[in-house]
Image: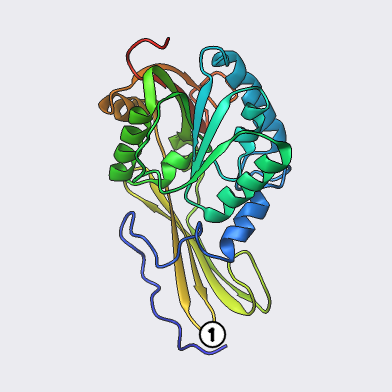
Amino acid sequence: MTKRQVKDYRLPQAYEKGNGNIWNDSYISQQLLTAHLDPDFDGASRKAAFIDASVDWIEKEFPVKQFSKVIDFGCGPGLYAERLAKREYQVTGIDFSRRSITKGQRRAEEQRLGIKYIQANYLEWQPSTAYDLALFIYCDYGALNEEERRKTLAVIFDSLNEGGQLLMDNFTINQLAEVQEKSQWSYWGESSFWSDGEHIVLSRTKKYSGNLVLDQAIVNTNEQQKIYNIWKYFSTRETLLGELEAAGFVVREFYENVAGAPFNVNSETVAVIAEKPGSLD
C-alpha cells in the first residue's frame, strides 16, 4: 500500500464533519444494517430481549387506544416499528439510511405490516400529519450538535398532536466518566467494518469540553482517505430538561432507559417522557 493518500490526521474542531458518512456509505451502511439485525449485538441496536421489554413497557405507558399513531425518528430497519405494528399501532418510521429504509420496507411487506417508511434527513423533514407518540431512542440525540438538537426537537414538536408524547433517551455523564482517550493503527489485508479490501485505519477517541467525545476513524486505501467523525454528546437530567423545555415540551418523567427502569444517580443513560401541551382526544 502506498502512502500518497495520507493527507489529514489533525484533530477536528468540535462537531466538525468528516468527508465520509457511515449512513450513506455503500459499504459501511451494509455493515451497520447487519449489526442492526443481529439480535445478540447491541452496538448498533439494542439486543432483541431489551427491545422486547422496551416495547412491552411502551405499550403499557402509551396504550394503543390513546396513542395509536406513532412516529419513530431514526427507525433503522424497523425493529421497534415492526413490534409496535404487530400490536396494532399505526407506525411511521423515518431514517437517513436508504439501505435501512429499504430493508424495513421489505420486512414489512413480507410480514404484511402496514408501516410507512420515509427515507429523509429528519433535520430537514416537514411533517404532513400529526402523531400521538414520537420515539427518538438509542441515544441518537447524542450524535447531534447543539443546533441540530434544537432543530430535531422542533421537528418532533411540530409532528405531534396537542397532548402528544415524546419518548427519547441519551448518554449521561456517568458514561462519559468511563470513556478513555486512545488511538491506534490497524492494517487490514482484507475487509473490515470500515472498508473492503486492503486498508489502514487510524481509530481514536478524544474527549472535548462541553460533555463531548469524538470517536474517529481515518481509513486509507490505495484510492482515497475517508474520515468518519462520530460525535457523542452526554446529557444530565438538567441539560436535557432545559433543552426540552426550550423546545416547548413539558417533561413528565425521567427513567434510566426506554424499558422504564427507574433513574438513579449512577445511570449511564437517561430516558425521558415529554409532552406537547394540550389535550389528546
Q: Is residue 164 above or below residue 228?
A: above
The C terminus is located in which quarter?
A: top left
Q: Residue at x 56, y 26 (%)?
A: 90
- Image position of 84 (left or right of 179): right
The image shows residue 268 at horizontal and vertical percentages of 52, 33
Q: Name the residue nearer the viewer: 246 or 6.
A: 246
* Amino acid at the residue labelled 1: Asn
- Image position of 78 (left or right of 67): right
Q: Name the residue nearer the viewer: 119 or 268.
A: 119
Residue 239 can be seen in this image? no
User: What residue does disc 1 label?
Assistant: 222
Q: Residue at x 50, y 51 (%)?
A: 180
Circle 1 SS class: loop
Q: Name the residue nearer the viewer: 69 or 37.
A: 69
The image shows residue 272 at horizontal and vertical percentages of 45, 24
The N terminus is located in which quarter?
A: bottom right
The image shows residue 42 at horizontal and vertical percentages of 65, 43
Q: Residue at x 43, y 36 (%)?
A: 173
The image shows residue 273 at horizontal and vertical percentages of 45, 21
